[in-house]
Image (tube, grey):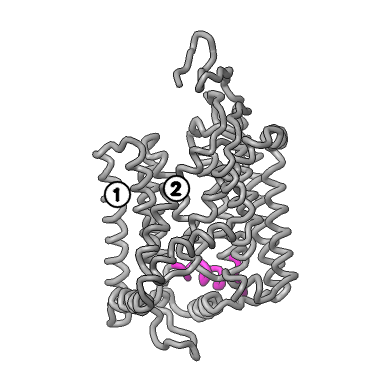
Amino acid sequence: MTPDHSSGTVSVDDVTVQTARARPRLLSSSSRAVLAVGWLTTLMVSYAILAGTGFTLRDPDSTLYEYIVRTLEPRPLAEWLAPHWQPGRWKQGLFQEHLAIFFWPAAALGRLGFTRGMLLANLAFHLGALWALFRLARHLAGEAAAWGAVFLYAVSPLGIQYVARGNHENAWALCTTAALLCFLRRREALRFSVGFVAWAVAAFAVKGVLGLLLFPAAFALWLAERPRWREVWLFVAALVAVGLTAALYELAYAAHTGESFFAGYVGAQLSYVERAEETGLWQKLLTPAYYAANLLYFALPGSLLLLVALVRPSRPLTSHPSSLPDSPPTSPLPLGEGQGEGVVRQRITASTGLRLVMLAGGAAVLGVSLMTRRAARYVFPVYPWLAIPAAQEALRRWPRLGRFLDARAQLLPWVLMGVVLLVVCGRALTNSVLTQHINPLR
C-alpha cells in the first residue's frame, strides 16, 4: 500500500479509495468539562442506586474484601498495609492473599463518608476500564469501532456482572489495557513509555503475580512488529519498577508486622497451584478449552461477531475517517472526544483488533494455562479486548452502522452513560445470586 500524494488516492489490493484529511472533532474546554461532569454524575448516581437500594454483595471474595475495607477505614494509615481475615473464614490472622494496595481507594472513600466505599471504587474502576478500552480500540481501529467496542462490553455478561462487585478485576483490566495502549504508542512520545511502566506497576499492585501477565502480552505484540532490540530497556525498566515496588512493600510490611508479606503470599499461591496439579494431566489439557468457553460466553454478543468474522469473512469495505485508527491524537483525550487530523481513508479489516486478541490475549491465556488451577477471572482483561475485532466486524458487515455512529458522535458519550445507568438499575432490581457469581451455573 503506497500513498499517491499527487493524485490524492491510495491503492489497497486493487481497491482505490480517496485520501482525506479528517476534520478534527476536538472538544472545547467547556465541552470537556461538561463531559467530565456527566461521567462524574453517572458514577455518583450509579453508586446512589446501589447503596440506596441496599445492594448486597454475595460472592465470597466480594464480601471478604468489603469487610477488609470497612475494617481499614477507622484504622491509622500505617496499619493499612496489614489487613486481617474476616472471622469465620477458612483462614485467620494477617491477610496475605493479595497486596493491600487494592483496598486503599475504597477505604479512603469510606473515610470520606461513603458508606459503601467498595461499591463506589469498583464503579470507578469499571468506568475506567471502559475509558481504557475506548482509547485502545480507537488507536487500533478508529472511533466508530471504539464506540462499538465499549457498548458491546458494557452489555456483555461480564460487564453486567462486574458493574457491581468488590473484586480486583475491574481495576486490573483498567491497568492492563491502559498499559498495552501506552506500549503500542511508546514510539510516539516518552510519556507513553513512562505510562507503560507506571501502569505495569499498578497492575502488579492490584493483582500481584497475575498482573505480570501484561509482560507476555506486550512481548508478543513487540515480537510481531519487527522489534527494535534497544526497546528491551522498556521491559527491563518496567520489571525493575515492579521489583522496587515489591521490595518497598516488603520492607514496610515487615517493619509494621515483623513478618514477611511475600513469604506468606508466595506460599499461599504455590499451595493452591500444587493442590490443583494433583488432579492429573488431563485436567491441565482441558484448561485451554475451559478459557475458550468462558471467553465465548462472557464476551457475548461480541464473541459471536468475532466467530462469524473467523468463519465467514465479510468483504473489504471503505469507510468514513471515523472508522480509521488514530493518527494519533497528541494528548490523552476524555472518553467521547474525537480523533486528530491527518487520517487517510483505508478499508476496514478486523486485523488490528484480531491481532491484539490473538497475540496479547493469546499470550495471557497461554500463561495461565500452564497451571491446572483455573478460574474464568484469571484472564479478565482479555474479555473486553474481544469487543474490538467484534466491533470492526460489525462495521464491515453493516456500513450504515459506521455512518450512523459518525453522525451522532457528540451524543454517544451520553448514550453510553445511559446504558451504564440502565445496567446498574438492572443489577439493583435483580439482586440475586444468579448475577453475583462469574459462573452463572454455580
In the image, is residue 278 part of the stretch drawn in magenta?
no
Are the residues at dot 1 and dot 2 in contact (C-beta closer than 8 Å)? Answer: no
In the rendered image, residue 397, in percent from the top left (x then y), is placed at 65, 36
- Residue 206: % across, % down: 43, 64
Q: Secondary structure at mark 1?
A: helix
Q: Which range is magenta? A: 102-120
Task: Identify residue type, mark 1.
Answer: Phe
Left or right placement of residue 96 versus residue 230 in this view: right
Q: Which mark is residue 235?
A: 1
The residue shown at (59%, 76%) is: 442
The structure residue drawn at horizontal position 75% and vertical position 70%, both measured from the top left corner, is: 429
**Label placed on residue 272:** none
Which residue is at a point 56% across and 72% down the rendered structure image? 110
| Amino acid bearing label 2 | Met
- Is residue 74 visible in the rendered structure shown here? no
Residue 24 lies, with reference to residue 278, above or below; the image says: above
Quadrant of residue 405 within the rendered picture = top right
Helix, strand or loop at disc 2?
A: helix
**Residue 399 figure quarter:** top right
On screen, residue 280 versus residue 406, left or right, reads left
Residues packed near mark 2 inside 10 Å, few (<14), some (14 to 19) or many (20 plus)? some
Q: Which residue is mark 2?
A: 358
Q: Which one is closest to the eye, mark 1 or mark 2?
A: 2
Q: Residues within 10 Å of mark 1 (few under 14, many from 20)?
A: some
